[in-house]
Image (cartoon, helix red, strand yellow):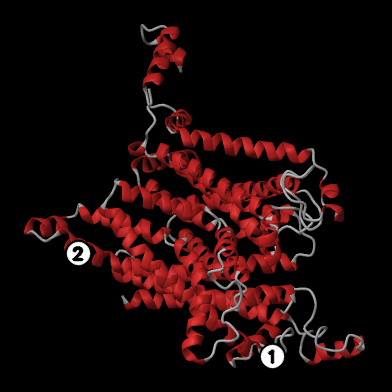
Amino acid sequence: MAENFAQHSSISAADLDRLTREAQAEATPSTARIIWNEFKADRPALISLFVVVGFILFVMVGALFINTPKMMETNIVDYFNRPLTAGFPLGADAGGRSILLQLIVGSRNSIGIALGLTIISSTFGICWGLISGYFSGYVDWGMQRVYDFMMMLPMTMMIIVLVTIIPHYNAVTLTLIFSIFYWEGTSRLIRSRTLAESGKDYAAASLTSGTNRWKIIFRDIMPNISSLIIVDTTLSFAENIGVETGLSYLGFGLPSQTPSLGTMIANANDPNNITQYWWTWLPAALEIIILCLAISYIGQVLRRAADASQRQGTTD
Amino acid sequence: MWKTILRRLLIMIPEVIILSILVFLLAKAMPGDPFTGSINPKADPEQIHHLMKLNGLYDPWYQQYWHWVVHLFHGNLGDSYQYQEPVSRLIAGRAGNTLWLSLFTMILTYAMALPMGVFAGRHEGQLPDTVIRVYTYVTYCIPFFVILVIGIWVFGYILGWFPTTGSISPNANGWAQTIGSHLTHILLPGLLGALFGTVNIVQYLRSEVIDAKHSDYVRTAQSKGVPSKDIYRHHIFRNSLLPIAAFAGYSITGLLNGSIFTETVFSYPGMGLLFVNSIIYRDYTVITALVLIYGILNLLGTLLSDIILSLVDPRIRID
């Protein structure tokens, strides 16, 4: 296109490049830049971001150096070692297993499942919402009935029942089972925004000029609601941490030999543990609280970045 | 109006049928059979085979499903293997506890959320609004079961203000003591549930109030000289009441899902705890019945909300 342009005007190709760059610099900053400015303007948000990313990297890498089967071996000598004793910075549980090591491996497992669940359920929910919102009429009607039906199912119960039916399950099957039930919120949100977007002129213009409908959905409408998608995905990640840990807490998530933040909190189910041996479960509970608060704080900042009227960061 | 309700009711019918088929098939897929537990383990496998045949367990699934539905309409949900009594009687005994706890939680939620929502909207952008926003943000993102565990630890065990198990103290005599004991047992779970369940109502009411503040009818009232306290109480709040009431239906769904966690943490003998115990003991008849009941209650909750909303907002109605 640049060559074409140069043939018909007096501006050289190099000048055109320079002009384009200048124009781009003056135009609206990119989404990434807006988000980064927003974080720079909000110190607690920047701290949350570093804490969350740093922590996730730490447990992911740290868990690689921990021999889980060896860690889960019972060692009766260290029965309920208090925190800050030799070799046990956070104490030990009824089996003499280090709480700190379990916390690292457990965080890796819980965060991993939450990440997987977020990726699968958000992708599905986004596609569902986009398609349902764009193709109104019978398609939308049918998809909405499926949505209604899924909303009617008692989620926690259905997940527990499915977990009991499946004979051998692991983290992957567990993530898939959760994903069946956690896409509705996203799909609802995306659908309503898609409905609004598909009525706009650019979508109609694109259709009139002969663009394929699927291309309109994924190349025109989706980029236009990308900020909503980013915010929603971040917030569902914070929520999804509670899904696996909650089920594991009840005893229907990861098996007790695979540590998870939920199975660690389940130590509190024993009335002796909950008061006398508080260090067996309290660290995991506090970690979940801090993690969820930090992640959804990041989500709030992203939401502000998505809405020009709420931004605090300067875009220069 | 009636058309909308009728339509919603008609859509419900296939939903309930599909739910019942799903629940039935899930129950079939569960490992084990209903007799292994209830008869002598040394029984002749031939005899079990005969019993299964007699009870139609070798029939095709749709015939079995039909028998099950017929029994269902006669109020026969089967017998519980763990408790050796009819499931219907077992659940009826537990349903009351869950009902009272949910009702209590809901009343407390509204009692807290309504003033907070109006207050936050009225003082938009000021300190009270910020405080309430931080509160809703914190309560929204922390998983509920973590709060329950920490709550029972602090208030139940360390401070000892509340009982930590059961629904009634065994030595409560007379009706006054019985009611009092019941109340103390549901107070902590109810308070925690309410404190952490206000987000939706507060945020909705806040934005409603902010919208209303800039509306014509409020400006008219202001220019007539109506005191601002009365504007908020009689004009704005009353206008927002119906949509807020619609949240009641949706919160039934949330409370039911939460009841599994609440009742487990507090060892409160309701339907949620019954479900968890039945899963542990593989008590399939009870599990099937409970999933079905929870599904239908969810459906009724959503129906209630939809009807209230369509009363309020004519755009939702389909004529």
Identity, as a three-letter code, of the amino acid under mark 1: Glu
Q: Chain of mark 2?
A: B
**Image quadrant for the C terminus of chain B?**
bottom left
> What is the quadrant of residue A208 in the picture?
top left
Q: Is residue B134 above or below residue B60?
A: above
For image coordinates 45% across by 68% down, the residue present is B251
Please state the horizontal and vertical placement of residue B313, each as a whole percent of the image: 29, 65
Identity, as a three-letter code, of the amino acid under mark 2: His
Report the disc number at residue B31: none
In the rendered structure, the answer to whether residue B251 lies left or right of residue B240 reads right
Please state the horizontal and vertical placement of residue B302, each as a whole percent of the image: 45, 70
Q: Is residue A160 above or below residue B137?
A: below
**Image quadrant for the N terminus of chain B?**
bottom left
Q: CA distance from mark 1 to mark 2?
A: 55 Å
Please state the horizontal and vertical placement of residue B21, each as a whole percent of the image: 63, 76
Q: Is residue B90 above or below residue A315?
A: below
Q: What residue sits right under mark 2 in the picture?
A: B235
Q: Nearer the viewer, residue A316 or B52?
A: A316
Q: Secondary structure at mark 2?
A: helix
Q: Nearer the viewer, residue B182 or B121?
A: B182
Q: What residue sits right under mark 1 in the picture?
A: B85
Label 2 Cα crowd, 10 Å radius (few <14 / some 14-19 / many 20+) = some
Label 1 Cα crowd, 10 Å radius (few <14 / some 14-19 / many 20+) = few
* Marked residue nearer the N-terminal end (1 or 2): 1
